Structures are given as structure tokens and as C-alpha cells.
Amino acid sequence: MEIQEKPVKETTKGLDEMIEAGLHFGHRTSRIHPKMKPYIYGVKNGVHIIDTEKTRDNLSQALEFIGNLIKEEKILLLIGTKIQFKGLVKDIAQESGIPYVAKRWLGGTFTNFMTIRKRIEHFKDLKEKREKGELAKYTKKEIAKIEKEINDLEEKFGGIENMEKIPDAIFVLDMKKDELAIKEAKRKGVKIVAISDTNTDPSLADFAIPANDDAISSVSYILNKVKDVIIKNRK
């Protein structure tokens, strides 16, 4: 059944902002995950509409968890590997001072962390040699090869090069796209905060935020809330 718009007077400023940012748009009804049904408000033009009141409540709980995490000086890792979010993820993470993965999740990042750290140390060593001018002793061909390796390693590890241990929690923008990261987090006991669109299983996350995970406006809205709470609670 098609939904009817709620009267404007019944909405709050926060809910209006969410709707304006498109957080309420889910996927077509044929793509619904059964466990997302409690978060559905209705259907419009064959698309599920997410109940923004539940989005607001779950987002509030997630932000409270993140705030306490930062107060305790624990590590939150931001994960968003969709191409359209690469710049946004990097900017938000750098502004917040947290590690991030914006390219591709490397299998074993958590489950084989010591091996990953060795690759990161190699990456940092190459960068240090470049900064100190120690590459000058090599031929142009050798330098070009080293530069390429540095660039490749930057793509893989640039966002986590200062992450000395497995994080205490992860924030995942798309649970389907980064399913492997969630599996590794669960194996290592890492808490999971995630956006849960209508085609995903919200029970995979400790804190699921029912919202559109495809639109930049929606993801940007949520990430800016995350950034604000991190900055506010950082010592």
C-alpha cells in the first residue's frame, strides 16, 4: 500500500533534515531483507521507505557508543569502499583523526594483523627513505619502481598506517560491500556500527543505523554526525 506523507507539524527538525538528505529511501520492495521489516515505514513508487524516527533513535545510540569509545581513547576504524564515497571517507576520517579504509578491504587485516603490520612498516620505511633523499643513490629505473611501490602501498595502507593494533570498533558504510570486514570483526570481537539499508541484515551490527547507504547526501549526513561526536569527545 502506498504511504501518505506525514503532516509537516508532526515532524521534527532532525527528521526533516534526514528526509531532505534522503536517508529514508530504501531499495525496491523485491530486495527487502526480512530482518529490516521493523524499520520500514511504508512503500512509495515500489520502493521501501525507512522509518526515520527509528533511524534517529538508532543513530543516537550509535553516536553515544562512539562518543564513549573516543572518551576512553579507543580506536574506531571507518570502512567505506564504494568508489563514490572514497573522497568523503578520507576527508571525514582525516578531519576526525581516525583510521580508515576507502579502497578495498584486504583479507586478513584483522585475522592476520601482524603480517599486515609488517607490510605497513615496509611502506613507512620506503617513505622515510624518500623523505631523507636516500633514493638518490638508485638509478632512475630503480627509483621509478620504488615510487610505484610506494603509491601502491599508499592505496592499500595509507588510511591505517598509524593503526598500531586491531581497532575496538568499526563503522561500516555498506555491510554487503564490506561483508568480509564484518566477518573478520566478529571473529576478533570488534564492535560493529553500520548503516543498514533495506537489503541488508541489521543483526550483523551491534549498532545498526537504518538508512540509505547509496546516496552521498545520506552517507554524508551520518558521517558528519559521527565526525562531530568524535571531535566533541576527543581529549
Image (spheres, helix red, strand yellow):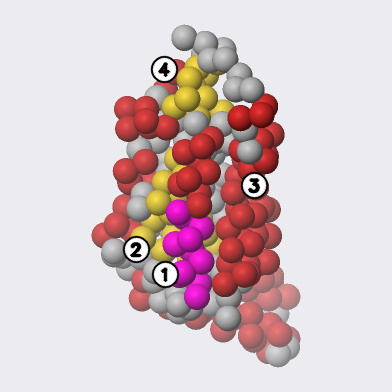
User: Disc 3 vs disc 1: which is toward the camera?
Assistant: 3
Specify which label sits upstream in the sequence, 4 or 3.
4
Specify which label sits upstream in the sequence, 1 or 4.
4
Judged left or right of residue 44, residue 208 is left
Q: Residue 23 at x, y = what percent?
A: 58, 36
CA gap, disc 2 to disc 3? 24 Å
Crowdedness near tag 1: few (<14), some (14–19) or many (≥20) residues, C-alpha within 10 Å: some
Kind of residue at disc 3 = Tyr
Range of magenta residues: 61-71
Specify which label sits upstream in the sequence, 3 or 1.
1
Contact? badges 4 and 3 (CB < 8 Å): no
Judged left or right of residue 112, residue 58 is right
Q: Residue 217: within the magenta?
A: no
Please give the label number shown on residue 30: 4
Kind of residue at disc 1 = Pro
Q: Residue 103 at x, y = what percent?
A: 56, 54
Q: Residue at x 46, y 69 (%)?
A: 68
Crowdedness near tag 2: few (<14), some (14–19) or many (≥20) residues, C-alpha within 10 Å: some
Q: Which residue is mark 1?
A: 167
Contact? badges 2 and 1 (CB < 8 Å): yes
Kind of residue at disc 2 = Val
Look at the picture and state if 145 lies above or below 79. Answer: below
CA gap, disc 2 to disc 1? 7 Å
Specify which label sits upstream in the sequence, 2 or 3.
2
Q: Residue 64: within the magenta?
A: yes
Specify which label sits upstream in the sequence, 2 or 1.
1
User: Disc 4 vs disc 3: which is toward the camera?
Assistant: 3
Residue at disc 1, secondary structure: loop
- The prevailing secondary structure element of the residues shown in magenta is helix
Please give the label number shown on residue 190: 2
**Is residue 32 or residue 231 the one in the foreground?**
231
Residue at disc 3, secondary structure: helix
